[in-house]
Image (tube, grey):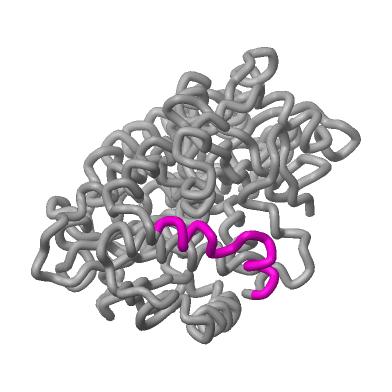
Amino acid sequence: MEIKAIGCEPLQLKRMHIKDGHTLKVYQETGGYESLKKAMNMSQDDIINEVKASALRGRGGAGFPTGMKWSFVPRQSPKPKYVVCNADESEPGTFKDRYLLERDPHALIEGMLIAAFALGAAACYVYFRGEYRYLIDIMDKAIDEARAADIVGKNILGSDFSCEFFTHTGAGAYICGEETALLSSLEGYRGHPRMKPPFPAIEGLYACPTVVNNVETLTAVPQIIEMGGKAWQELGTEKSGGTKLWSVSGHVKKPGVYELPMGYKDLEKFIMEDCGGMLRDDKKLKAVIPGGSSVYIMNAEQIVGKGVTMDYEGLVVGGSMVGSGGFIVMDETVDVMESTKNLTEFYKHESCGWCTPCREGTDWLVKIFNRISEGGGRPEDAQLLLDICDNIEGKSFCPLGDAAAWPIQSAVKRFPEDFKKWLLNKTNGNGVVANI
């Protein structure tokens, strides 16, 4: 498993290979909590303006500008304010946040404290996915270390600033990665998404102003305060500042977590050189899902020789999205109909059942995929899949419906031969006869 920076000095990953990098002692020896001290001598507006200048965009999938999100929190409010970390890393193909939580938990604490100081929040919550329970022990120990050093709790670093930290675990529900469903779960309710507006910045946790950011986003904040927003932005592009972590898996020789500057050129070079090229006797590249399973799948023709840049704008031009940075590489032996069927089963299983298009639509999609894989495919099934996706996309209560539709839409349109073999010849892309 590779954990390294390509094309830049390691920022997010700089403590990944340091012994005991998760401890307060090592964190402070490597510059930890100096950014917090600096921030506490700045005004709230100045901190938010630095984050705006950095062009930091949410690393959880949506890519919304972080500084702008913070600025939506009302300055004067009779209600308490909260900072919530979304550590519900459940997107298939994404595992970068796990390493940050495991090996550099104090970076998250520092980033959240800076956010809390800037927003006037008196409490921070870290919400872990159910399968990450072992990471809560690491985070709780880090919080205890910070509290013993007067970095968490009352009168932080001898100042008037006080902020408490709490950890909370979900129960393994993908839907709780959506920020309002996460807040419902954090309050003790079933993890259902909420109607927006009001947005969490106005009415979030306990109907109070709340900022929700993911792990990678918040661990970038100390770097921004240390370097200055403009300097951090210049590591990337004008609209996609800084560096980005990518969780690389699939058919490459060097899977792992990579830190790249935003705007890195190019996607093909990253696969074939930086990640060591293709596995299995150097098979040819067939497909890439660049941002986790809920973004458009790309075929080799969209990548090879195209110079696709790895940032929010470049990947949209290339035909997909950054998403959560879950980078899945597939070689020529993969049957895209079968891989898409697998993803569809995941979304059907994880649908919360709240709204009809998603609840019923994902169920029908799985039924059609099952019929096709059992030898009952029909020529019109490709269009039927697209029609059902059209009735889900943009018509569901939360983005899970879109996440279920986009992989299918792109797979059917960009890999028609893989579907034709099943629908016309009852065989998969490798010539295996369907189980009739």
- Image coordinates of residue 27 in percent, x first then y, are 64, 67
Residue 378 visible (yes or no): no
- Image coordinates of residue 172 in percent, x first then y, are 46, 71
| Number of numbered markers | 0
- Image coordinates of residue 397 in percent, x first then y, are 22, 51
- Relative height, residue 378 to residue 209 (above, below): above
Residue 243 vs residue 354, the one in the foreground: 243
Lateral position of residue 228 relative to residue 259, left or right: left
Residue 73 vs residue 34, the one in the foreground: 34
Lateral position of residue 243 relative to residue 253, left or right: left
- Image coordinates of residue 340 in percent, x first then y, are 54, 42
Magenta: main secondary structure: helix
Q: Give the range drawn in magenta.
A: 25-39
Q: Would you identify the image quadrant in which residue 298 lies?
A: top right
> Which quarter of the rendered picture does the N terminus lie within?
bottom right
Residue 189 vs residue 125, the one in the foreground: 125
> What residue do we see at 55% from left, 43% from top?
325
Residue 28 visible (yes or no): yes
Looking at the image, the residue that sits furthest to the right is 281
> What residue do we see at 32% from left, 33% from top?
387
> What residue do we see at 42% from left, 28% from top?
239
Q: Would you identify the image quadrant in which residue 120 lies?
A: bottom left
